[in-house]
Image: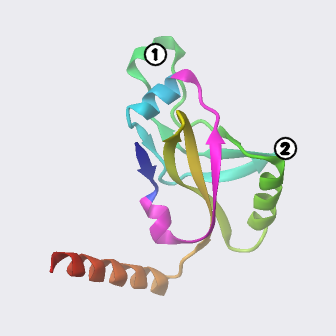
Amino acid sequence: MEVKNKKAYFDYIILKEIEAGISLVGSEIKSVRNGSIDLKDSYVVFKDNEAYALNIYIAKYEEANIFNHDERRSRKLLLHKKEIKKLKEMKEMEGISIIPLKGYFKNGHLKLLIGVCKGKKLFDKRESIKKRDLEKEKNIY
């Protein structure tokens, strides 16, 4: 199971990608295994030398009853201190955002692919649309 943040690939130029673990509670991991996760509009912030992913939607797990989780709570990212420091320095640069790009399982653990991104201008987006359309036409013929 792999979840992509398609909007991020369209709206941003990805400069660097880093794999990070994510801290989840039991009902969240069950829900993710069912495929109930959405990375759209999510981003990464830094508090007290720790990284947190905000606005990731993980649907409630129906069988969890009273032990269920909040769907859009902030979730701690599991990174080394050096990686957090490096990402923090990059984020302080002008026009740089840190965004979750993909969610996937690796050895039974959920991993997030975090991207250091720079926003695209309107003409860059048009160029992306043009390339996508050419690829579609090439695959048809």
Q: In the displayed image of the protein, which residue is found farthest to the left?
A: 141
Dot 2 or dot 1: first in sequence order is: 2
| Most foreground residue, 39 or 138 | 138
Horizontal placement of 57 versus 113: left or right?
left
Is 20 in the magenta?
yes
Residue 62 in picture, x, y percent from top left: 39, 20
Name the quarter where the C terminus is drawn.
bottom left
Q: Position of residue 35 (x, y in %)?
A: 38, 37
Please name the residue shown 64% across and 41% down the image.
21
Residue 109, picture quadrant: top right
Residue topped by disc 1? 64
Single out the residue that lies furthest toward the top: 66
Can residue 59 be seen here? The reply is no
Of residues 71 and 138, the one drawn nearer to the viewer in this rendering: 138
Report the disc number at residue 48. 2
When the figure is inspected, residue 38 is found, relative to residue 136, above or below; the finding is: above
Picture coordinates of residue 71 (x, y %)? 51, 33
* Magenta stretch bounds: 6-26
User: Can the viewer see residue 5?
Assistant: yes
Amino acid, disc 2: Asp
Q: Secondary structure at mark 2?
A: loop
Q: Colour scheme of this structure image?
A: rainbow
Q: Residue at x 45, y 34 (%)?
A: 32
